[in-house]
Image (spheres, rainbow, N blue to C red):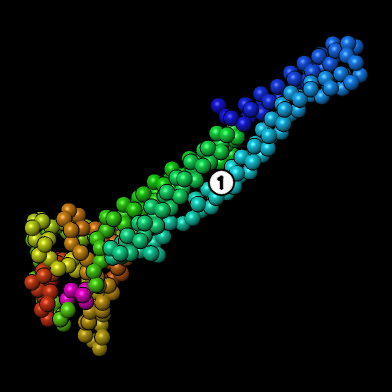
Amino acid sequence: MNSLPILTFLASIAVMLTTVVQLFISFKSFKKASKSESKLADVVKRVPLLAVAAVLIGVFYLNFYYTSELNKEEKDFEALLLKSHNKLDYQYYMLDNARKKRVIDSLNNYTAELKASVARIKKQQYITGKNTIPISNASLVLNKTNEEIRNIESYNEIINPQSILLNQKGLTTSGTTSNFVFSCPKDRFSEYVDLKLEFLDNKIIDKIACIYLTVYKDTIVNSEISEWSLFEQAYKPKSGINLIKIRNYLRQPKVKLEIGYILKSESLKEYPRFEKVTCE
């Protein structure tokens, strides 16, 4: 049950009962007391009534105070709900560990702030007995934020290719590999596409310098076919599903995507071997 509405009701009842009792006592003693005694008695008899009235005023003040606090908390809560944390422009799938940690910390702080706001509103609603906004909306936002955190943690960490392939002038390729499982994306309409790669033997992961991804387009220059690079990135390998998100370049014609890995033993060579598969 709510505290202030009950206190207000009880204080009002107390004021009415005290008033009735005081009137009855004053009427009974009106003829018996002298004039001075009557004045003193009147003052003494009014003390309980004044005390109850003071309590009633205090209750109404508390009700006003907590209602004002509730209105303030509700405005802050609505502002939190409008706060955007679902932005693709920070490209959470293209983060190194340091930036990934900063984004996750920011989202965790937002979650804690929203939970604290809900707790304060519930407290104010309990005291005032008022429920003007649906705080259940917070659950949807919290679920969405937690999903973002899981997404950020699930995608592979990016690596600067130049920090690994120090002497690279080009690549030699096998054209095919049987060391990992990868299915070329079939989606030709979505703006972004997920690439999933899984190594068949986890023992090879410690030997891998990076997962390497390149996207290029065949173009004709001076009547000759030339490869125009659209995207190139290296990723830190991990056991289980390696998840990479990129723009869906395959929506364009004559685009090829190559994905695979380069071993640590190859990384310092001028033409390291690129174990890969090709999608087009």
Q: Which residues are magenta?
A: 161-165
Determine the residue positioned at 19% across, 69% down.
212
Q: Is residue 259 in view?
A: no
Would residue 164 be found to the left or right of residue 133 on screen?
left
Q: Is residue 227 above or below residue 3?
A: below
Helix, strand or loop: magenta stretch: helix
- Residue 186: quadrant of the picture: bottom left
Q: Secondary structure at mark 1?
A: helix
User: Relative to the observer, which residue lies in front, 40 or 237?
Assistant: 40
Instruction: Residue at 33%, 64% (x, y): give it.
Output: 99
Location of residue 123 in the rendering, given as x and y in whole percent from the top left corner: 53, 37
Q: Does 164 appear in magenta?
A: yes
In the depicted structure, whether residue 51 falls above or below residue 137: above
**Residue 126 figure quarter:** top right
Return the residue found at the far bottom: 222
* Position in image of residue 45 (x %, y %): 79, 21
- What's the residue at 10%, 78% (across, down)? 269
Asked if residue 43 lies in the magenta stretch, the reply is no
Q: Amino acid at mark 1?
A: Glu
Position of 152 compared to 53: left or right?
left
User: On the picture, is 268 further left or further right than 56?
Assistant: left
Q: Quadrant of the C terminus?
A: bottom left
Give the side of residue 106 with respect to residue 235, left or right.
right
Nearer the observer, 60 or 271: 60
- Count of numbered labels shown in the rendering: 1
Residue 225 x %, y % = 21, 82
Is residue 24 something that shows in the picture? yes
Of residue 135 and residue 51, the one placed in the foreground of this image is: 51
Instruction: State the residue position of label 1.
Output: 73
Where residue 71 sits in the image (x, y, percent)? 61, 44
The quadrant of the image that shows the N terminus is: top right
